[in-house]
Amino acid sequence: MGVAQAFAQAADADFQGLGIAAEEPDPDRKPAWAGEAESGYSTVLTNHGLPGVEIVRRAELLGAYLVVLGRKERVPDGPRPVDATTDAVIRRRNGLSLLVPPSVRTIRRAVIALDGSLRGSGVAAPAVAFLKLLKAQAHAVCVLPGVPFEVSDAGGWRDPRVEWLSEVIQRLPSLTPAVDLRVSWGNPVTEILDAVQETDSDVLILGVRRGGQRGDSGSGYVGRELLRSASCAVLTVPI
């Protein structure tokens, strides 16, 4: 809850904690985490039903800017599956969702993953607005398929996608320091995870598509693998 509290304080925002009971909750009995939450937040709620459905429903009723969910630590010998609650929230949610493992207590640096497409660039502005509230540093990473185009002319041809992405980044609200753009070619999952590690980032920001079947976050193969493999927090942005 520490990251949620820090964000709420930075944004001067209201916070509501939601506990989902397996059975109809006893109105006279508080959840185990209620005392901790009440010490730093304005309201604590409990609810009954399917967690993934109830979380999104409550967020929509409140007009919540951000939903914060816990996230299991990645096991050393491989990726982790995305649990049913997280999967449902990502597929249904029409706003930002932040998935936070226990090891992340604050957000100071972030990697924003871009794919070079017009739709994919929609992640950039919400990501920067979120990071600006936390006064965090941002690194934008775009991984393009294939290998970089090479020409003999020293004055050289540049991939138009790189030029266009540079313009997208320059038009974003200002951060201190400014958002830097790193463009590479190759395997998107490997390159993005390497960037997270190299920048010591606390959060990876991904664009996701809503809907789809259970187990498919709508973000395609790259998004699913990053959700399973990233060891840091993950912020999902519907695009």
Image (cartoon, grey):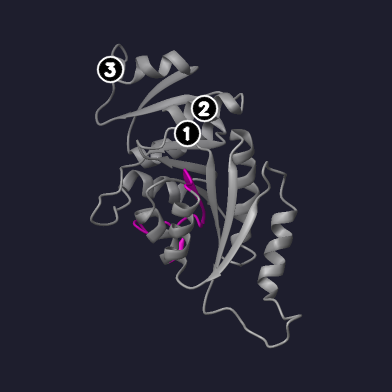
* In the rendered image, the vertical position of residue 164 relative to residue 69, given as above or below: below
Q: Is residue 18 left or right of residue 135?
A: left
Give the residue at mark 2: 6
Residue 106's disc number: 1
* Pointer 3 residue: 26
> Which residue range is magenta in the image?
200-220
Please state the total of marks drawn on the protein image. 3
**Quadrant including the C terminus:** bottom right
N-term-proximal mark, 2 vs 1: 2
Question: Is residue 37 at all visible to an observer of this figure?
Answer: yes
Give residue 7's position: percent from left, percent from top.
Answer: 54, 30
Whether residue 212 appears in this view of the structure is: no
177 up-or-down from 220: above or below: above
Location of residue 24 in the rendering, given as x and y in whole percent from the top left corner: 27, 25
SS for dot 2 = helix
Image location of residue 120, percent across then percent down: 59, 61
Q: Is residue 152 magenta?
A: no
Lower sequence index among marks 1 and 3:
3
